[in-house]
Amino acid sequence: MLYSIDRANNVNRKFVWIGERLAKVFYNLEYDLAKAGLEISSEKYLTAAFFSALVYGIAIFFFLYGLFFLRDAEITAQNSVLAFAIGFAFFIVFFLIQKIYPGIMAKKYAAGIDQSLIYALKSMLVQVSSGLNLFETMVNISRANYGTVSKEFEDVVQDISSGESEPRALEKLALKTKSEYLKRTSWQIITALRSGASLEGALKSVIQTLTAQQLRAIKNYAAELNMWILVYLLFAAAIPTLGITFLVILSAMSGASIGQEHIILMAVGAFVMQIVLIGFVKTRIPKVFL
C-alpha cells in the first residue's frame, strides 16, 4: 500500500465515508486488523487502500494508453476502452490484495506465536510448579524472549494491572488471537481458574495436547506426502514419456509429423507442472515446533 499505517490513520475526514461504505461489505476486516496488531480502524484502512489502488489503476491506464498511442500514432476509442478496462482491473486486483493483506499478516503473526508457544508453556509449568502464581508467571513470560508470545502475555499483564480479572484478560486474548493453539491454551487456563482446578495440571494437559496435535500433523503429512510423490513422478516422468511415445505412434499411423516445437512444449509443460506441485507440497508442510 502506498500509505503507511500512520499516514492512513491521518487520512482526511472528507474521504472516510468511502471506507465506511466499504467496511459494511468487508465487515470482518476489523478483526483481521486487530489480530495482525495493526492499530487502525477498518474505515480508515479501507479508505487508504481505495486511494492506493486507485493510484495504481490510473498509473496502469496512462502507461498502456501511452503504449497504444506509440503503436498506432493516434488516439482511438478501442484503445481508450481497452486501457481503461485493464486499468480498472488492476485497481480491483490491488484493492483486493490490500484488503486481504491484514489477514495474511494475522496468519504470519499466529505462526510466530505457535513457534514459541510450547517453550513458553513449559517455562510456565516449571514456574507454577515452583510456587509462583499465574500473574507472576505471565509477567516473567512477558519479559522473556519468546517472541510474539511474550508480546501477547505483555498485553494480558497490562490488562490485569489496569484492574481486569485474570480470566477476563485471558478471555480477551483468546478472542483476539488467530493462533488456534494459543486460543485453546487460554480457554484451558480460564476453565481451570473458574473451576478451581489445579493450574499445574491444566498446563500439563495443554502441553500434552499441543504436542500430540503436532505429532499427529507430522504423521498425516508423511502419509499425504507419499501420494504427492506418486503424483509428482506421474507428471514429471510418466506422462511426458508416454505422451511423446503416443504422439510418435499416432504420427506413424496418421502421417502427421511431430516437430521439435511439440517436444519443447511438452518439456516446458512438464517443468511448469513440477514447479506447481513442488510449491503446493511446500505449502502443505505442517507448522510444528517441538
Image (cartoon, rainbow, N blue to C red):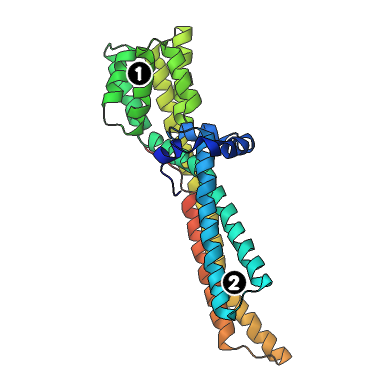
10 Å neighbourhood of mark 1: few (<14), some, or many (≥20)?
Answer: few
Residue identified by numbered label 1: 158
Query: Does residue 166 sit above or below 25 in this rendering?
Result: above
Front one among 143 and 187: 143
**Residue occupied by mark 2:** 239
* Mark 2 secondary-structure assignment: helix
Give neighbour class at mark 2: few <14, some 14-19, many 20+ (Cα, 10 Å).
some
Amino acid residing under circle 1: Gln
Q: Amino acid at mark 2?
A: Ile
Vertical position of residue 63 compared to residue 214: above or below: below
- Judge from the rendering whether residue 15 lies leftward or rightward of residue 129; answer left or right: right
- Quarter in which the C terminus is drawn: top left
Q: In x, y percent, where is residue 192? A: 45, 13
Quadrant in which residue 243 is drawn: bottom right
Q: Earlier in the sequence, mark 2 or mark 1?
A: 1
Rendered residue at 49%/38% (across/down): 12
What mark, if any, has residue 170 been given in the picture? none
